[in-house]
Amino acid sequence: MSGFELLTITFSFIVGLGVAQVLRSVAYVVREYNQISLHWIPFSVAAIVLFFQVQFWFGLAVVNSLMVQWSWPVYILMLLLAIFIFLAGATVLPHSLSSLGERGLKEDFETRGRISLVFLALYLVGWIGVGSAMLYSLRKSFNPPWIALATRIAGHTKRFPGLWIQLNPLNLAIT
C-alpha cells in the first residue's frame, strides 16, 4: 500500500460520511414530502455540496499526481477541506421531523441551513491554501519559464545587479 493510499483513508472516511449524510437527508425529506413544504433552494445547495464531495476525491488524485512528497501543511489543509465539505453536507438539510419543527424546508434553510454555505465557502477558499502549500513544497522542482526569463533579464542589468535574489526568493532552479 502506497503512502498516498494510507493518507487518503482518513479523507475518504470523512467525505464518505458526508456523502452518506447528504443522501440520507435527501431521502428523509423526499420520504416525508407530505408533511414538509418542499423548496428547490435547499435541494440545489445539497446537489452542489454532493458535487463538491465527489469532486474532492478527484482533487485528491490530482494533488497526489503533483506531489513528490506529502508534507504536513498539505495534509492538514486537505484534512480541513474534508471536514469543511462534510460539515456543509451535514448542515444543508434537516435530518428528522423533530429538528424541522413547524417550519417548511425553505424556512429551515433560511434559519439553520445557511451555515452550509459558510462551510462550502471555507472549502472552496481552502483549495487556494492547498495550491499555495503545494507550490511551496514543490518550489525546488517548479520552474515556470517566465520567472527564468524575468530573472535573467533583470539580473544582468548594470543598474540592478542584486535583483536576482529579490526576484527569486524561493530559490527556483533556473536552467
Image: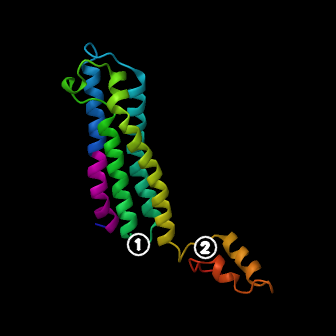
Q: CA distance from mark 2 to mark 1?
A: 17 Å
Q: Position of residue 29 (x, y in %)?
A: 28, 23
Locate residue 7 relative to residue 126 in the image: left or right: left
Residue for badge 2: 143
Residue 161 horizontal side relative to residue 138, left or right:
right
Decide which of tag 2 and tag 1 comes sooner along the chain: 1
- Boundaries of the magenta span: 3-16
- State left or right for residue 35 relative to residue 124: left
Query: The C terminus appears in which quarter of the rendering?
Result: bottom right
With respect to residue 158, does 48 lie above or below?
A: above
Residue 101: horizontal and vertical position, in percent? 23, 21
Q: Residue at x 46, y 65 (%)?
A: 133
Image disc number at residue 80 = none
SS assignment for the magenta stretch, majority: helix
Q: Residue 9 in magenta?
A: yes
Q: Nearer the viewer, residue 59 or 108?
A: 108
Q: Amino acid at mark 1?
A: Gln
Measured along the vertical axis of the image, is residue 22 above or below residue 163? above
Camera-side residue of 14 and 126: 126
Q: Which residue is mark 1?
A: 69
Q: Residues within 10 Å of mark 2 (few under 14, many from 20)?
A: some
Q: Amino acid at mark 2?
A: Asn
